[in-house]
Image (spheres, rainbow, N blue to C red):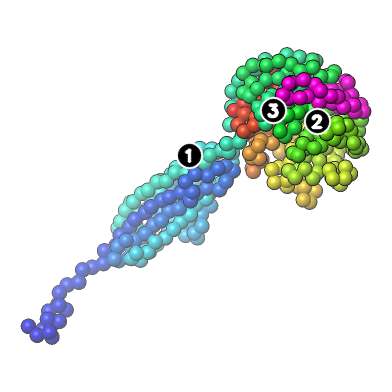
């Protein structure tokens, strides 16, 4: 057969028609994320065939128990109010792949597995399906918000702190300082201090503790290795709160003398007194120790003290009294203020000094406030009559109330952040994991 004839025969053979195909795969953007964080899924719809397909539709019933709304990155898609992803992709050419990404937000209240299944179909093909799962985990260095135990402590337990070495000191208004060790299954003994010990704070290395004695006008210096008072620092008036900076070289004391006293622990002695608003109370340091923020029990402002000069840098007017505990966010950008009378947490942007929307706490009179070591949650005691601790997700402002009964007062966290210790003036300390 000649080449011309062979070519003619080949031309007469029928060609195979194009064969369309439809495939779908789904995967998490990240398989594991730590809250608070964005998370989501990627859905790949493809045509592995040799011809086009038409009428391509994608549907996915997305997880509903999330904090944020679901968003999608393609204009052919929409997330319906019911939480269903619906995409009309129309035509897919041979070998074409279309990727669809949906994302949402998980707070520290949404630590769970999130799964869903995507479905794709076309005019003549389908359906095809695939599922995926994302694990949203809570930070390790914060409690899960679950009451895990209760230790009976008499004589009105009030202030509390936990050292880096795991020692737990509890200031008891009607007695002395009770002590134990993490996880505080029982008490190990007591420490004699001054009259009406109200607050306690450890040095960063856990070697020393400082206790304010309200009716002795003094601060007790306690050797944490022997659990014995080794010195007393006299201050004016009745001291309330005590705070130690992260370097351990300054101790700050508030009280009813309308001043904050600065103690050099190497002496130990008061080296400065900074006049502030009436009855200074709660104190919080910026992460770099550059500023000390002081609330006012009887006044109507928050004062910012520059710690390098012990001078007032700014004053934030509140227009109401009874500001209690304070906390500064982990990034140093935000100040949180517990307002006992108005039942809310006020939120101040420290870069601008402008106040944002407050966080209301229904039925609470916020008193004690502490930022978890994770920086993602605030623990707030509800004050007189509440019997609750409120846990606030910093990223969203959402809160949950945990009823403990009695009168919760102060909060301190264990060395790894996984346990919280809440004093209750009625006569116990709750341990939360």
Comes first in the chain, label 3 or label 2: 3
Region of the chain picked out in magenta, as a range: 212-239
Q: Quadrant of residue 340?
A: top right
> What's the mark number on residue 242?
2
| Mark 2 or mark 1: whose residue is earlier in sequence | 1
Viewed as shown, does residue 175 lie left or right of 106? right
Q: Residues within 10 Å of mark 1 (few under 14, many from 20)?
A: few
Q: Is residue 231 shown in magenta?
A: yes
Residue with the mark numbered 1? 113
Quarter in which the N terminus is drawn: bottom left
Pinpoint residue 60: horizontal percent, then vertical percent. 43, 48
Q: Position of residue 315 (x, y in %)?
A: 86, 44
**In the depicted structure, whether residue 292 falls above or below residue 298:** below
* Residue 25 on image: x %, y %: 38, 52
Of circles 2 and 1, the one toward us is: 2
Residues packed near mark 2 inside 10 Å, few (<14), some (14 to 19) or many (20 plus): many
Distance (Cα) linking label 3 and label 1? 33 Å
Q: For the residues marked 2 and 1, what is the alpha-carbon distance in whole angstroms?
A: 42 Å
- Decide: is 299 above or below 194: below
**Quadrant of the snapshot with the C terminus:** top right
Q: Nearer the viewer, mark 3 or mark 1?
A: 3
Q: Is residue 159 above or below residue 321?
A: above
Residue at 72% over, 24% down? 225
The quarter of the displayed image where residue 7 is located: bottom left
Per the image, the residue denoted by label 3 is: 162
Q: Are marks 3 and 1 in contact (CB under 8 Å)?
A: no
Crowd tier of the residue under label 3, counting other residues whose Cα lies within 10 Å: few below 14, some 14–19, many 20 or above: many
Q: CA distance from mark 3 to mark 2?
A: 14 Å
Is 89 in front, or is 99? 99
């Amino acid at each position: 057969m000649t080449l011309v004839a062979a070519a003619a025969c080949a031309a007469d053979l029928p060609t195979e028609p194009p064969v369309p195909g439809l495939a779908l795969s789904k995967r998490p953007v990240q398989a594991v994320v730590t809250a608070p964080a964005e998370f989501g899924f990627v859905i790949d719809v493809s045509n592995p065939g040799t011809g086009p397909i038409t009428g391509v539709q994608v549907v996915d019933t997305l997880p509903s128990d999330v904090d944020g709304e679901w968003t999608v990155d393609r204009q052919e898609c929409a997330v319906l109010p019911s939480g269903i992803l619906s995409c009309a992709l129309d035509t897919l050419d041979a070998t074409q792949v279309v990727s669809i990404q949906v994302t949402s937000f998980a707070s520290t209240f949404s630590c769970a597995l999130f799964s869903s299944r995507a479905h794709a179909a076309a005019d003549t093909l389908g359906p095809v399906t695939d599922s995926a799962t994302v694990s949203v985990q809570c930070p390790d260095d914060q409690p899960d918000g679950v009451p895990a135990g209760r230790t009976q402590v008499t004589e009105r337990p009030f202030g509390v702190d936990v050292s880096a070495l795991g020692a737990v000191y509890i200031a008891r208004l009607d007695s002395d300082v009770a002590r134990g060790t993490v996880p505080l299954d029982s008490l190990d003994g007591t420490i004699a201090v001054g009259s009406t010990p109200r607050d306690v704070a450890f040095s960063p290395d856990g070697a020393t503790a400082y206790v304010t004695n309200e009716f002795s006008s003094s601060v007790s210096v306690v050797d944490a290795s022997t659990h014995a008072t080794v010195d007393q620092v006299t201050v004016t008036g009745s001291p309330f709160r005590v705070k130690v900076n992260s370097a351990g070289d300054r101790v700050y004391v508030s009280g009813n003398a309308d001043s904050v006293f600065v103690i050099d622990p190497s002496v130990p002695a008061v080296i400065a007194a900074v006049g502030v608003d009436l009855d200074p109370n709660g104190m919080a340091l910026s992460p770099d120790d550059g500023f000390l923020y002081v609330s006012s029990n009887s006044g109507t402002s928050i004062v910012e003290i520059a710690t390098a000069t012990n001078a007032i840098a700014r004053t934030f007017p509140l227009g109401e009294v009874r500001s209690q505990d304070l906390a500064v966010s982990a990034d140093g950008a935000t100040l949180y203020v517990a307002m006992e009378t108005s039942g809310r947490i006020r939120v101040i942007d420290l870069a601008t000094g402008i106040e944002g929307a407050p966080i209301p706490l229904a039925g609470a009179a916020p008193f004690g406030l502490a930022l978890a070591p994770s920086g993602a949650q605030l623990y707030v005691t509800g004050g007189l009559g509440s019997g609750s601790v409120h846990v606030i997700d910093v990223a969203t402002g959402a809160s949950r109330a945990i009823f403990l009964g009695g009168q919760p007062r102060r909060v301190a966290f264990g060395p790894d952040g996984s346990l919280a210790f809440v004093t209750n003036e009625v006569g116990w300390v709750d341990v939360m994991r």
